[in-house]
Image: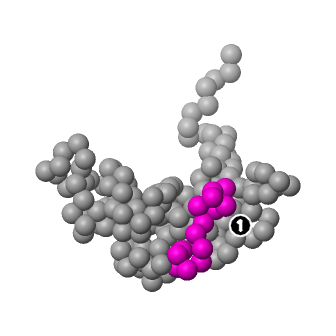
């Protein structure tokens, strides 16, 4: 029977060093991978043809068209608009339930019944949502004529307090 190697032997020190180096190499590889994903998944000002749903391309990746908002920004929007918890009308909404009242308010303001709030790919660890007018899968049925869409965009910009234009964002699916 071989004697047990204690943590203070040269062999255990070498093994520990090797394990730390291997973990460091894995972290570097993972960071490089996510950097490449982030580079490929930046928001887009217009939808490239290759991401449009067609008979020849029935299943491209899902992208949604709208305004990016963090949960905190949506919570602040709900507070500014005095949005209430549907189950407890005497209480203001909390961060974990602010999405539904917020989307209802935005639908009303924009006069857009199909407006939604969806989670999207985010290069940071923070949760990112899109106040979405439509996706590349629903734009054929939901996209308005340009003048009406511009009116909706302007109302949403005013309501959300933003100047930025809506963009195409990568869905989390």
Q: Residue furthest right?
A: 56
| Neighbourhood count class around disc 1 (C-alpha, 10 Å): few under 14, some 14–19, many 20 upward | few
The image shows residue 32 at horizontal and vertical percentages of 70, 63
The residue labelled by disc 1 is 40
At x 83%, y 54%, the residue is 55
Q: Give the residue displayed 36% in from the left and 74% down from the top.
A: 159
Q: Nearer the viewer, residue 102 or 14?
A: 102
Residue 63 at x, y = what percent? Answer: 64, 61
Q: Which residues are magenta?
A: 136-150
Please tell me in which quadrant of the rendered image residue 16 appears.
Answer: top right
Question: 105 left or right of 43?
Answer: left
Specify the quadrant that holds the N terminus: top right
SS at circle 1: helix
Q: Main secondary structure of the magenta part?
A: helix
The answer to which of 22 and 97 lies nearer the viewer is 97
Q: Between residue 147 and residue 105, name the one nearer to us.
A: 147
């Amino acid at each position: 029977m071989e004697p047990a190697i204690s943590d203070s032997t040269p062999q255990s020190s070498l093994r520990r060093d090797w394990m730390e180096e291997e973990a460091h190499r894995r972290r570097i590889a993972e960071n490089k991978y996510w950097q490449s994903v982030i580079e490929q998944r930046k928001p887009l000002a217009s939808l490239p043809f290759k991401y449009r749903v067609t008979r020849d391309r029935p299943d491209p990746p899902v992208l949604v068209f709208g305004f990016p908002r963090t949960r905190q920004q949506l919570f602040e929007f709900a507070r500014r608009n005095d949005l209430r918890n549907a189950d407890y009308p005497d209480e203001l909404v909390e961060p974990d339930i602010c999405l539904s009242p917020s989307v209802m308010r935005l639908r009303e303001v924009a006069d857009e019944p199909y407006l939604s709030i969806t989670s999207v790919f985010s290069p940071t660890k923070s949760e990112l949502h899109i106040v979405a007018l439509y996706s590349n899968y629903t734009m054929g049925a939901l996209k308005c004529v340009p003048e009406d869409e511009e009116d909706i965009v302007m109302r949403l910009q005013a309501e959300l307090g933003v100047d930025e234009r809506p963009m195409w964002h990568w869905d989390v699916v």
